[in-house]
Image (cartoon, rainbow, N blue to C red):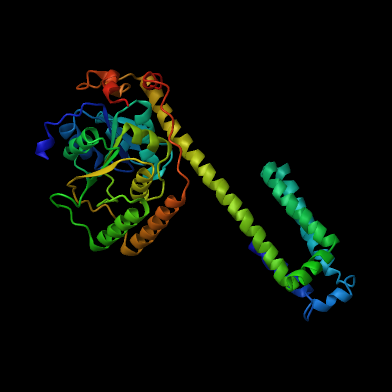
Amino acid sequence: MTEHKEYKPDCRVLVIVPAYNEARRIAGALADLKTHAPWADVLVVDDGSHDATGDIAASAGAVVLRLPLNLGVGGAMQTGYIYADRMGYDAAVQFDGDGQHRAGVIASLVRELRENGADLVVGSRLIGRRSYRFPLARYVGSRILVLMIRILTGLRTTDPTSGFRAASRRMIRFFAAHYPQLYLGDTAEALATAARHGMAVREVPARMTMTNSSSIGNLMGLFYMVRIAIALLIDRLERPLPMPPEPAGPADAESNK
Amino acid sequence: MNLLIGITTILAQATAPAGPTAPTEAQPFSLPWTKYLVPLTFAVIIAVITVELVRRRKLREEYAMIWLAVSAVLLIIGIFPQIVIWLQDLLRMHYLTIVVLGLFSFLAVIMLHFSIVISRQSDQIRRLTQELAMMKRQLEDRQTPKPGLNEPAKQPGQADGPTGDNPSRE
């Protein structure tokens, strides 16, 4: 982590933090961001929380978008991308509000994006020094998704369920228009969709903190796994989505303020 | 809807001829009166309910059309039950089978139609929700301008502001 501390991105970076009833943990995540990625703007998308998530985030200095309805992670994430697109950000980083992701890694995600011309950079828990231990069932599920994505799109990934990602300008515009909405399937499906639409997808090592937030049992896990697999298959059959046109001009970000 | 199927099925069973139906071709006009009455009854009930719902503004005209069409089909079957007899001979199926099959295909089509409508509407609701969140933010910014919040591009540490993204534009 320390090796990236000196790296300061040469562009405007927005960190998108979708949060649903995260009042207890959001402050920690925002403090981490302030310490380890002070150069980034932070947007918290409050996904219709019933607690003080939005207020806490606002008082911590983040820009807060409050969704009047709970849309789920996919809908909240897309809101962040729409915001990033309209405000003309060059890079957007998906960051969980529950403290699982570490702000220190953001610099290396953005660096991969900027220096190696990637469109989507995924922070993988499975490359580099491993500090994250998957429960067996989730590991097996993750391997199956890796294989499916490999077969369906040709993309080689190691951690398709990682929600720690950075997106380029092009990727931001695409996700603002089309972002998968399937519950717990948005990460894997977004990868497959991005790969299928000619986006350069890369991975960098990302250490993560274990959170015991996953309350899904093995049986439900299997159910979600099957659902994601079907979604990937359907995604493969879908006609290519149109790439949204470039906004009118650089002034667009200003007029949309 | 299940009730409707149930009733129709029972009535159809009651009205179905006991034996195989192939010989009915010989006497096509000696049909039991129930074969006229049952579809006609349903046609009238559906039409009355539909019109009443439209009158109370609980059903939009475009959906009322579907149900009026159903009523019309039942009306035709009620007036000309020979259509079903003709189908019986054509498909070599029992009266009951044809009724159940017809109902099933109708329900399948209409449920598919509603799934498509619901999918489109949830997309629209999502878009509206996102747009609403965005506009609330803009409104709050205008009412209580806080430095660094209404214009995230110009937060301290990013002094070059909106021009900073120029080198990256492809």
Q: Point out residue A116 in the picture as x, y percentages from the top left corner.
A: 22, 36
Q: Point out residue A209 in the picture as x, y percentages from the top left corner.
A: 18, 48
Q: Could you tell me if residue B49 is visible in this image?
A: no
Give the residue furthest to the left: A2
Q: Is residue A29 above or below residue A148?
A: above
Displayed quadrant of residue A135: bottom left
Give B72 or A233, whichever is nearer the viewer: A233
Q: Residue at x 13, y 36 (%)?
A: A4
Displayed quadrant of residue B18: bottom right
Quarter of the image with the N terminus of chain A in it: top left
Count the numbered circles shown.
0
Q: Residue at x 51, y 39 (%)?
A: B124
Q: Residue at x 21, y 26 (%)?
A: A10
Quarter of the image with the C terminus of chain A in it: top left
Q: Could you tell me if residue A19 is visible in this image?
A: yes
Give B52 or A37, whichever is nearer the viewer: A37
Give B65 or A159, whichever is nearer the viewer: A159
Q: Is residue A225 above or below residue B150?
A: below
Q: Is residue B21 left or right of residue A109?
A: right
Q: Point out residue A222 in the picture as x, y percentages from the top left corner.
A: 35, 62
Q: Residue at x 31, y 58 (%)?
A: A147
Q: Point out residue B78 in the picture as x, y percentages from the top left corner.
A: 82, 61
